Image (cartoon, rainbow, N blue to C red):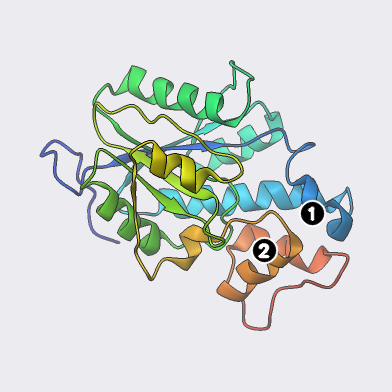
Amino acid sequence: MGPMRRDGADGGAEAAWSLVVPLKPLVRAKSRLSRATGEEVRPKLALAFALDTVAAALACEYVGDVAVVTDDPVAGERLAALGARIVPDTPARGLNAALTHGASAVRARRPDAAVAALNADLPALRPAELGRVLHSAAEFPRAFLADAAEIGTTLLTATSGVELAPAFGGPSRARHLASGAREILAPDVPSVRRDVDTVEDLRAALKLGVGPYTARQAPLLADGATAPAGAP
């Protein structure tokens, strides 16, 4: 068993975070992978990414709970079985509205919650690396981690009493910087930065070593971007 979680009562850097993970309906998710994967594998891969992301997040010692904002019934059922809370995407106005809604749902239950928005496409996510990022983020009212390309964002945090104010999509790193969020520059957290939109991204994630759900789907890829030997 890993270290026990703090419940956040001491307000310290080790308070338990509530993570909000947005997931669009699988039929529309990860459209840029279509050409390489085919239409049958793509939604399965999108679900596998989300399952590996949420499983790793729940295994992180600094995470108290995970809320997934989705209207996809299949994904909702599978992610709930892992221990996530499913929040319907009632705003239905895109990614940032979904994240704001998810953060509100978390704080409706736990008003003093520290919340973090996390991408659903981090299939190589390591609990210990996520923990390092969240531990750093606790020092600032709002903080974020840039993606591997240093253009987008994979994680945005807001400590207790601070609005999340998400600005995801496209060049969101610049928008989050401009909004006053502190950029986390932790060097050894590649799995938290490695989101997957393209086959090249997927190859890079496979090289890092993906979780079990993605590993099961990887051999089905049409272009041979299969898991390397020795991947978990």
Q: Nearer the viewer, residue 180 or 141?
A: 180
* Residue 192, position as x, y percentages in the image: 47, 59
* Residue 22, position as x, y percentages in the image: 56, 35
Sequence-earlier tag: 2 or 1: 1
* Residue 16, position as x, y percentages in the image: 27, 42
Above or below, comparing residue 150 to residue 32 in the picture: below
Give SS at disc 2: helix
Residue 198 located left or right of residue 206: right
Residue 157 located left or right of residue 120: left
- Residue highlighted by disc 1: 33
**Amino acid found under the numbered disc labelled 2:** Asp
Above or below, comparing residue 136 to residue 202 in the picture: above
Above or below, comparing residue 62 to residue 185 in the picture: above
* Quarter the N terminus occupies: bottom left
Residue 179 located left or right of residue 138: right
Which residue lies at the image location 69% right of the left edge and 30% below the top edge?
Answer: 72
Residue 114 picture quarter: top left
- Residue highlighted by disc 2: 201
Which residue lies at the image location 59% right of the left edge and 66% below the top edge?
Answer: 210
* Residue 41, position as x, y percentages in the image: 83, 53
Which residue lies at the image location 19% right of the left edge and 39% below the top edge?
Answer: 8
Residues packed near mark 1 inside 10 Å, few (<14), some (14 to 19) or many (20 plus): many
**Amino acid found under the numbered disc labelled 1:** Leu
Which residue is most to the bottom? 229
Q: CA distance from mark 2 to mark 1?
A: 10 Å
